[in-house]
Image (cartoon, rainbow, N blue to C red):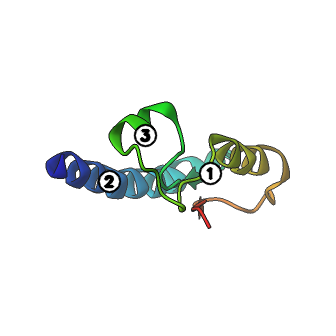
Amino acid sequence: MRIRGVRRVKMGGRGIRYTASLVHSLCSYGIRMNGINPGWLDTGMAREYNPSGDPDWIAPEEVAQAVLYLAAQAPASMTGQFIDPFGN
């Protein structure tokens, strides 16, 4: 399991760099791009992996709120930013 976690962390870093690259490419077309980097989500699949849970896990609804903010309320000039919703 440790190797899987390392792979996910590395992919997360690549995803951030890829998103930042796309921001520069798409900016001239008026396309904004932002990202969301959630911590552990309190889902059934996560509970199978770690049944005891963790106080820092967040509900999927909290990530949905971040998505809604980016889609509806984020300033028009906000691009290339990442929201990091974590637990308590």
Q: Which of the two discs, 3 and 2, labels the residue nearer the N terminus?
A: 2
Residue behind mark 1: 28
Real-space CA distance between mark 1 and mark 2, rounded to the nearest whole angstrom: 23 Å
Real-space CA distance between mark 3 and mark 2, rounded to the nearest whole angstrom: 23 Å
Could you say whether the residue bearing mark 3 is in a helix, strand or loop?
A: helix
Residue at 65% x, 59% y: name it: 79
Q: Residues within 10 Å of mark 2 (few under 14, many from 20)?
A: few
**Of the numbered discs in the image, which one, if any, rests on residue 14?**
2
Residue at 36% x, 45% y: name it: 50
| Amino acid, disc 3 | Ala
| Amino acid, disc 1 | Ser
Asked if labels 3 and 1 touch by Cβ distance under 8 angstroms, the answer is: no
Q: Nearer the viewer, residue 55 or 40?
A: 55
Residue at 47% x, 51% y: name it: 40
Q: Nearer the viewer, residue 25 or 86?
A: 86
Q: Which of the two discs, 1 and 2, labels the residue nearer the N terminus?
A: 2
The answer to whether 46 is drawn above or below residue 70 in the figure is: above
Q: Residues within 10 Å of mark 3 (few under 14, many from 20)?
A: few
Q: Nearer the viewer, residue 61 or 54?
A: 54
Residue 9 at x, y = what percent?
A: 30, 56
